[in-house]
Amino acid sequence: MLTAVEFTLDPADVASARLLAIGIRPRLEFSLFSAAVVILLACSASPWNFSSLPLLIGLTATLGAFRLMQIGKVKAAALAAFRRNPTLRQPTAASWDDGGVTIQPAGALTERILWTQLQRLKENERVVLLLHGTGLIHAIPKRAFSDKASLASFRALARRHASKLGA
């Protein structure tokens, strides 16, 4: 059975896909850094205070700030890529069946990706990301799916091919 969705990417989709592709989850990382700073601050007011605690607080906050700057640079690069590449701004159709996924941007070449050619399938709160063995990525915004059932159907098909995905 062939199923399809149509979508147009926006800059936030492209940024989300890039971050997901390189393994960065900004909300999770920010939450973990915040929790670490809170725990360290709580320790500073407790009887278990130790002399290097201010240094640890400073280092944790610095690492968190550095990571936020890296995330900002990835988002800026994604926005630049979105502006530079007209294909990213075109309406796109994605269809899938037991053989694989077909991505067809308007006015560009159609690409058929067999399940055996996919390296991984990832997702976050915004996009489903298809990573090729060649290093290319395709993002399908979750808002393109008409309902949760159609997204679940896509996931189920992908899971059936999980051994081919290396998952």
Image (cartoon, helix red, strand yellow):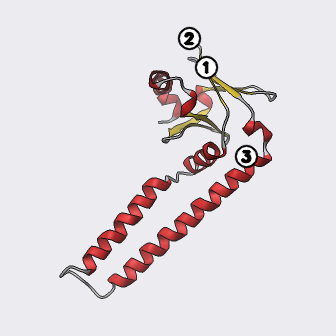
Give the mark, 3 or 1, whose residue is nearer the N terminus: 1
Figure quadrant of residue 29: bottom left
Looking at the rendered structure, the secondary structure element under dot 3 is helix
165, 150: nearer the viewer: 150
Question: Are there few (<14), some (14-19), or many (20+) residues within 10 Å of tag 3?
Answer: many
- Under mark 1, the amino acid is Ala
Give the mark, 2 or 3, whose residue is nearer the N terminus: 2
Find out whether the residues at labels 3 and 1 contact each other: C-beta distance under 8 Å. Answer: no
54, 1: nearer the viewer: 54
- Under mark 3, the amino acid is Phe
| Residue farthest toward the right in the current orientation of the protein | 107
- Residue located at (24% from left, 83% from top): 49
- Please provide percent x and percent y for residue 3: 58, 17
Q: Report which residue position mark 2 lands on.
A: 1
Q: Report which residue position mark 1 lands on.
A: 4
- Please provide percent x and percent y for residue 129: 57, 38
**Image disc number at residue 36:** none
Q: Is residue 141 above or below residue 44?
A: above
Looking at the rendered structure, the secondary structure element under dot 2 is loop
- Under mark 2, the amino acid is Met
116, 40: nearer the viewer: 40
Question: Are there few (<14), some (14-19), or many (20+) residues within 10 Å of tag 1?
Answer: some
Question: Are there few (<14), some (14-19), or many (20+) residues within 10 Å of tag 2?
Answer: few
Name the mark nearer the viewer: 1 or 2. Answer: 1
- Residue located at (76% from left, 48% from top): 83
